[in-house]
């Protein structure tokens, strides 16, 4: 294949979410473009549906005035969902920065101060600091090797864990929340019950389609991370779970009845679910908890409490290593949560599991 500006210098590699193209282009600053657009000053970029195109330099920079051709690697690996999350994080940061009393400071110092605000004033998890750094680098790639103050603030934030978002609750709390959501929002109640039974991550239940469900006699097979759709779980594609609770299988069957196989199983967004769970915790007198901790983390803790081995919990929860699973091998946190639950809520949770229904 002939060389020259705009000609292909490599081959297209595609699989899952990432697609790479090596192209020879004139020396210049890294460029960015979105799907469906053309660069005005050069040849056509590589466009992939449901992704954004990032241009990354792949050769040693030449001296001033050099008129050379060098390879450039275009990596399409940022999914639409990630772009939405980044956009929300940047919007919150920009809004806070405009109203911050510190005045006009650089983005690095502003990001560090915003992390302090999220940590101490809002009591949020330290993962939001990493999300903000990634979002800033995505918006301005030249910041990748920079942001020393923001990165230092994020590192200092991590051991504090003021939000307790990673702490599990207990089975009685899950039952009480499902019982309350049953009348407030039936779909939210079903999602909590499903995520608790399958150890499902937010991204797993959110992307689930009707075709991913297999109703067998007395069982429901669920497949997560369908590679053909460009999906993957945190630990790989084509993993799954089995639901054996008859009441939950019946509720899932009713919920998907009449839907096409390509339809999403759940129409609720993670943000909406989080809002309903927060409202349920407030009404039930429970400490604030996010759905991920309420369902997945609590399921792991209860599995250990029931006597399951680490290897079994690792398989059921689709964790990559036993080290990750052992984080939830803390029965004292379960006892701690039971001790602070109101008696009425505790009784409500226990009664739900005696006769569970949705």
Image (cartoon, rainbow, N blue to C red):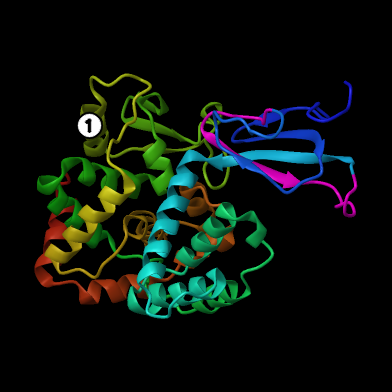
Residue 221 in the image: above or below residue 329 = above
On the image, numbered disc 1 is attached to which residue?
A: 250
User: From this viewpoint, is residue 200 visible?
Assistant: no
Which secondary structure lies at badge 1?
helix
Left/right placement of residue 78 relative to residue 292 reads: right
Q: Residue at x 68, y 35 (%)?
A: 41
Q: Position of residue 286 (x, y in %)?
A: 20, 68
Q: In front here: 313 or 297? A: 297
Magenta residues (range): 44-66
Q: Quadrant of the C terminus?
A: top left
Q: Nearer the viewer, residue 165 or 275?
A: 275
Point out residue 163 in the picture as x, y percentages from the top left corner: 37, 72
Residue 246 on the magenta segment: no
Q: How many marks?
A: 1
Task: Work out which residue is located at the far front of the displayed protein and give it.
Answer: 65
Is 54 in the magenta?
Answer: yes
Q: Main secondary structure of the magenta part?
A: loop
- Which of the two residues, 87 or 272, is positioned nearer the viewer here? 87
Identify which residue is drawn at 65% across, 31% down. 15
Give the image quarter of residue 147.
bottom right
Which image quarter holds the N terminus?
A: top right
Give the residue displayed 88% in from the left and 50% down from the top: 65
Direction from residue 305 to residue 27 in the image, left or right = right
Residue 21 % position (x, y): 74, 33
Residue 262 in view: yes
Mark 1 crowdedness (10 Å alpha carbons): few <14, some 14-19, many ≥20: some
Residue 298: quadrant of the picture? bottom left
Between 169 and 126, the one lying in front of the other is 126
Residue 335 position, x and y percent, is 30, 74
- Is residue 109 rendered to the left or right of residue 296? right
Q: Residue at x 46, y 79 (%)?
A: 160
């Amino acid at each position: 294949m002939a060389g020259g500006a705009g000609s292909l210098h490599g081959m297209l590699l595609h699989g899952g979410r990432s697609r790479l193209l090596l192209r020879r282009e004139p020396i210049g600053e890294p460029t960015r473009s979105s799907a469906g657009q053309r660069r005005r000053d050069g040849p056509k970029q590589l466009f992939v549906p449901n992704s954004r195109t990032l241009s990354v330099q792949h050769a040693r920079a030449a001296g001033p005035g050099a008129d050379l051709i060098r390879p450039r690697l275009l990596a399409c690996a940022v999914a639409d969902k990630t772009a939405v999350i980044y956009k929300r994080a940047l919007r919150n940061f920009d809004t806070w920065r405009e109203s911050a009393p510190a005045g006009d400071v650089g983005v690095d110092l502003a990001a560090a101060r915003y992390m302090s605000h999220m940590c101490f004033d809002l009591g949020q998890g330290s993962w939001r600091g990493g999300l903000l750094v990634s979002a800033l680098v995505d918006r301005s790639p030249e910041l990748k090797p920079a942001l020393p103050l923001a990165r230092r603030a994020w590192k200092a934030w991590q051991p504090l864990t003021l939000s307790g978002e990673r702490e599990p609750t207990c089975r009685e709390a899950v039952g009480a929340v499902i019982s309350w959501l049953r009348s407030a929002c039936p779909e939210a109640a079903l999602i909590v019950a499903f995520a608790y039974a399958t150890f499902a991550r937010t991204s797993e239940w959110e992307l689930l389609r009707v075709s991913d469900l297999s109703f067998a006699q007395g069982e429901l097979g669920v497949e997560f991370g369908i590679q053909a759709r460009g999906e993957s779980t945190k630990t790989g594609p084509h993993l799954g779970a089995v639901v054996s609770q008859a009441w939950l299988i019946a509720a899932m069957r009713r919920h998907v009845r009449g839907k096409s196989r390509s339809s999403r199983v759940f129409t609720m967004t993670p943000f909406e679910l989080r809002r309903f769970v927060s409202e349920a915790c407030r009404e039930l007198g429970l400490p604030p908890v996010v759905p991920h901790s309420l369902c997945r983390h609590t399921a792991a803790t209860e599995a250990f409490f029931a006597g399951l081995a680490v290897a079994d919990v690792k398989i059921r929860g689709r964790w990559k290593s036993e080290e990750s699973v052992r984080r939830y091998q803390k029965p004292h946190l379960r006892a701690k949560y039971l001790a602070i639950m109101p008696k009425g809520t505790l009784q409500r949770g226990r009664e739900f599991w005696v006769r569970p229904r949705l």
